[in-house]
Amino acid sequence: MTAPRLPDARSILSGRAAGPVIAATEALSFWGGVDPATGRVIDIHHPLHGRCLTGGILMMPSSRGSCTGSGVLLDLILTGRAPAALIFREAEDVLTLGALIAAEMFGKPLPVLRLSPEAFDALAKAGTARIDETVVAADGLAFPVTPPATAALDLTDADRAMLDGAEGVAAAQAMRIICAMAAQQGASGLVDVTQGHIDGCIYASPANLTFAETMADMGARVRVPTTMNAISVDRANWQAQGIPADFGDPAARLADAYVRMGCRPTFTCSPYLLDSAPKAGEAIAWAESNAVVFANTVLGARTAKHPDFLDLCIALTGRAPFSGVYLDENRRARRIVDVELPPETDDAFWPLIGYLAGRAAPDRIPLLRGLAEAKPSRDDLKALCAAFGTTSAAPMLHIEGVTPEAGLGAAGDADRAAITRDDMAEAWALLNDGPEEVELVAIGSPHASLEECRALAGALGGQKRHPQTAVIVTAGHDVISAARAEGTLDRLQTSGVQVLPDLCWCSITEPLFPTRTRAVMTNSGKYAHYGPGLSGRAVRFGNLADCVEAALTGRVPVRPAAWLAA
């Protein structure tokens, strides 16, 4: 039986727009990839790098990377710097949610459409396009627009009561947003969640603060235990650290707004390291891309990659759209990736493989084969999941013989890809475009575990860092407290290492980020990808031994990994 043909153009969020077509074959993370102050693409690895998106009809397969992209788009809309419209080829949630919030809460609609592959490819060649509620037209092309999907959601009496305002105006607003997202995702109903994790507490733009304080002032209170991501300042010390008040004050207010709503001030991007980490099969509602990928992949919990703002809406209601990887059938791999395993790999192998796995499967869940023999540790998997989340939109992956649901196998229609040593060498070179001299070593993206802190302290062996090279570790309060209790923190500080709570590498700003820095060394695939655009500096990638060499000598030769050179 032939599958029904999808419409050429479906409206996800309606509206009118006209402008030049800006088409990309590669997905883009708005957070870390687009500067909210200018609307320009700052991801140096993306084909649109340097292009201003303001006023354009932006076309790309989907989004990828950080859940905070919704906040960046909302800010662009509120300041008049946004694209005129968004057109996707695949399902997309993060930017769609930002546009939905702009329309629902601030009365500023931005059209979002999904085109069939054929229509997408044809429109991408056009110079300009015009969109209204009934048609997409450009250079002799015209595609009728199917209205936004509606769904007869199977809501409980409690759901309907919240919609009607029985739990207050904030819960009603949150439930309206959840139902709108559920409809565009094709969900038939909602699912209970046991806990949440808020990513929107990072001060990525003023829009994040506007949203949070609006909800807090409406009396919003979370209904399920809810942890908080890393924020943008060291909450207790930012003034003493010289952070300008025009950044530090709104960043602290943003954190305070979520605490007012009942969120737990954990301030970590590694919530899976907390005692409250979920169990296998538990339905949760996490945002923050690395945390989502780790929760699904390593813990076997269930969460969509919820965009910023939707994370709070779900925490306020305890309900999430019952779609995506909450459903058994959507957790199977759609691409099998055979990985060539070099001999004698080290800790840099895992983030590099995560980075490449995301590039090999940017829009679907992969099953990685060939890695079981290497026996990855929990921290290896942490690094792999974080890097995967920068280059893929998928909320999880499987590793044959390693992760708990890899036994599900692949779907019947799964295709195949491979990651070779040549691919690894190419990616290594891409992530090492910088000088030998290093003024800053960055550890803890995502937040370092206790084991990672011990490993760094052991590798430094009490030696003092080079006087011209700063070494900064970011970690959660629980990890820092444990490191202090066992003496690891003292060992790090003796070597001149600065250990910071609350914020993470993707939110550190000057002067806490040393202003004289020209090049950064990191063992994080995630920060190696985002760092150049976020910091404006060269960022080099390597293993922990490379980071220690940089810390002690102020330089690391630009060379391939030993296991690649063998």
Image (tube, rainbow, N blue to C red):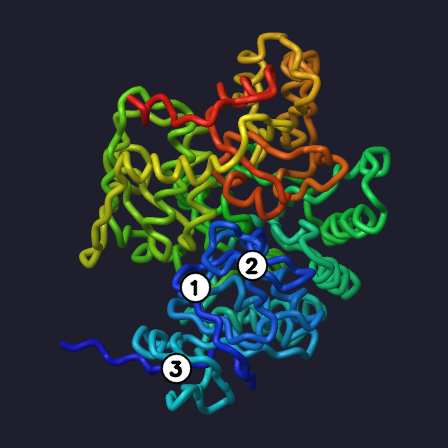
- Front residue (pair 544, 449): 544
Q: Amino acid at mark 2?
A: Gly
Q: Which quadrant of the figure contains the N terminus?
A: bottom left
The crowd level at tag 3 (other Cα within 10 Å; few <14, some 14-19, many 20+) is many
Up-down relation of residue 312 to residue 339 (above or below): below
Q: Secondary structure at mark 3?
A: strand
Residue 271 percent location from the top left of the image? 56, 39
The crowd level at tag 1 (other Cα within 10 Å; few <14, some 14-19, many 20+) is many
Q: Which quadrant of the figure contains the C terminus?
A: top left
Tell me which numbered mark, 2 or 3, is placed earlier along the sequence: 3
Q: Amino acid at mark 1?
A: Ser
Q: Secondary structure at mark 1?
A: loop
Tell me which numbered mark, 1 or 2, is placed earlier along the sequence: 2
Residue 43 percent location from the top left of the image? 53, 52
Up-down relation of residue 208 to residue 111 (above or below): above
Q: Secondary structure at mark 2?
A: loop
Circle nearer the viewer, 1 or 2: 2
The crowd level at tag 2 (other Cα within 10 Å; few <14, some 14-19, many 20+) is some
* Residue that carries the numbered disc 3 in the rendered image: 9
How far apart are the alpha carbons under marks 1 and 2?
19 Å
**Residue 326 shown left or right of residue 275 in the figure:** left
**Residue 391 shown left or right of residue 242 in the figure:** left
Residue for point 63% across, 14% down: 488
* Residue that carries the numbered disc 2 in the rendered image: 50
